[in-house]
């Protein structure tokens, strides 16, 4: 297991924890986790890399070892946090981003806002959020007001073993040793016999602002980086339809592959296919050259068939 180091920065008045692996002189890769996750979940992906990278992985605000935001969480804050992190770690060149789920949505939208700051992007399951309609607003606001009065909470556990069991229930592919490792990073002991998640419960409070997918798509259309989407093959049909509908003919650089045998990819069980995609995608600079090559890499990695969207 490769050793990581922890760094603390102040970003937009919040204490931000950033985990790094490797030599700072090596080429940089940024790993961005999803909702209810932590930077340490990428440990097993980093262990699969076959070349030297300086890997930079933040704990997003309110997750892991980063500070909690007193006023709650608004998606644009993640764009600003990512922008600040790139200024700290790679101010003079466009970055290589690998991001999962919510992190993939953040990275892709940011890549359209600041196309000059992103060279390549791999998004694991980051296909955007559900569409909403104006008629959804009254119920959404009412739910938000209710949750302000009675905030939702996360469950607590009696031990780290219980946390590990919960992780394996969510993801049966997770081995015992990996679950025990992740439990130590996902949770902390807050009292004797009480283990709580590191994540801020305010993340469970509904956002009163409706998702505006058209605005997100407008940003995606400004992406100039080459983009590879990777997803679990069992959700292939649904995600393929969403991918085609949302990207369409906007950019020939957008490509998608799907891994067989997984309902939904997570950083800790996507290590081999994602590692293969990372290794190969860094060489892809011209549109149209990435899908078949990445499909071959996934098969060689023993990860099942990779299929095109």
Image (cartoon, rainbow, N blue to C red):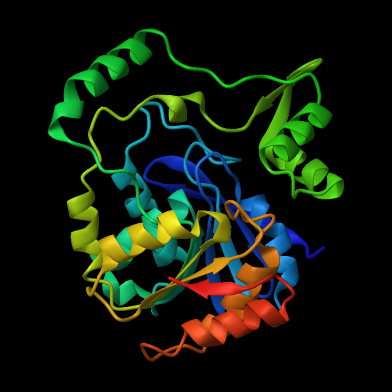
Question: Of all residues shown, which one is farthest toward the top?
Answer: 149
Q: Residue furthest left?
A: 134
Residue 74 percent coordinates (x, y): 32, 38
| Residue 55 against residue 134 in the figure, above or below | below
The residue located at (43%, 14%) in the rendering is 151
Between 5 and 257, the one nearer to me in the picture: 257
Give the residue at the far front of this rendering. 237
Query: Is residue 25 shown to the viewer in this render?
Result: no
57 displayed left or right of 289: right
**Horizontally, is 41 left or right of 153 in the view?**
right
Where 199 falls versus 285 (above or below)? above
Instruction: Quadrant for residue 180, please give it.
Output: top right
Q: Is residue 226 left or right of residue 65?
A: left
- Indicate whether 240 appears above or below 79: below
Q: Is residue 249 left or right of residue 204?
A: left
Q: Quadrant of residue 239?
A: bottom left
Q: Position of residue 125 (x, y in %)?
A: 48, 57
Instruction: Give the vertical position of 266 relative to 256 (above or below).
Output: above
Q: Tell me the residue at 56%/55% (across/down).
A: 234
Q: Nearer the viewer, residue 260 or 68?
A: 260
x 67%, y 51%: residue: 40
- Report the number of numbered marks: 0
The picture places residue 242, in percent across and down from the top left corner, at 34, 57
Question: Which quadrant holds the N terminus?
Answer: bottom right
Observer-nearest residue: 67 or 162? 162
Residue placed most toward the observer, 79 or 98? 98
Residue 16 visible in the picture = yes
Residue 235: image x %, image y %?
A: 51, 54
Could you say which quadrant of the image residue 309 lies in? bottom left
């Amino acid at each position: 297991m490769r050793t990581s180091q922890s760094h603390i920065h102040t970003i937009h008045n919040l204490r931000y924890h950033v985990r790094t692996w490797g030599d700072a002189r090596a080429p940089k890769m940024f790993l961005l986790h999803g909702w209810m996750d932590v930077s340490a979940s990428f440990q097993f992906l980093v262990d699969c890399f076959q070349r030297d990278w300086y890997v930079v992985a933040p704990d997003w605000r309110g997750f892991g070892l980063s500070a909690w935001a007193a006023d709650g969480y608004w998606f644009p804050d993640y764009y600003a946090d990512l922008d600040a992190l790139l200024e700290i770690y790679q101010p003079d060149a466009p970055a290589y981003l690998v991001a999962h789920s919510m992190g993939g949505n953040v990275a892709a939208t940011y890549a359209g806002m600041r196309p000059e700051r992103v060279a390549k992007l791999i998004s694991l399951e980051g296909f955007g959020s559900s569409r909403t309609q104006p008629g959804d607003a009254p119920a959404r606001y009412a739910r938000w007001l209710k949750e302000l009065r009675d905030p939702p909470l996360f469950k607590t556990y009696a031990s780290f073993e219980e946390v590990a069991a919960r992780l394996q229930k969510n993801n049966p592919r997770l081995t015992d040793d990996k679950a025990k490792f992740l439990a130590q990073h996902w949770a902390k002991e807050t009292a004797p016999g009480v283990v709580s998640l590191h994540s801020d419960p305010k993340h469970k409070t509904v956002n009163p602002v409706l998702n505006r997918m058209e605005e997100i798509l407008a940003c995606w259309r400004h992406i100039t980086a080459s983009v590879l989407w990777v997803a679990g093959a069992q959700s292939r049909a649904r995600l393929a339809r969403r991918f085609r509908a949302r990207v369409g003919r906007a950019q020939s650089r957008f490509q998608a592959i799907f891994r067989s045998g997984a309902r939904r990819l997570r950083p800790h069980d996507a290590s081999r296919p994602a590692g293969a995609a990372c290794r190969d995608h860094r060489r892809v600079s011209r549109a149209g050259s990435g899908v078949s090559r990445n499909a071959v890499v996934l098969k060689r990695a023993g990860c099942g068939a990779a299929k095109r969207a």
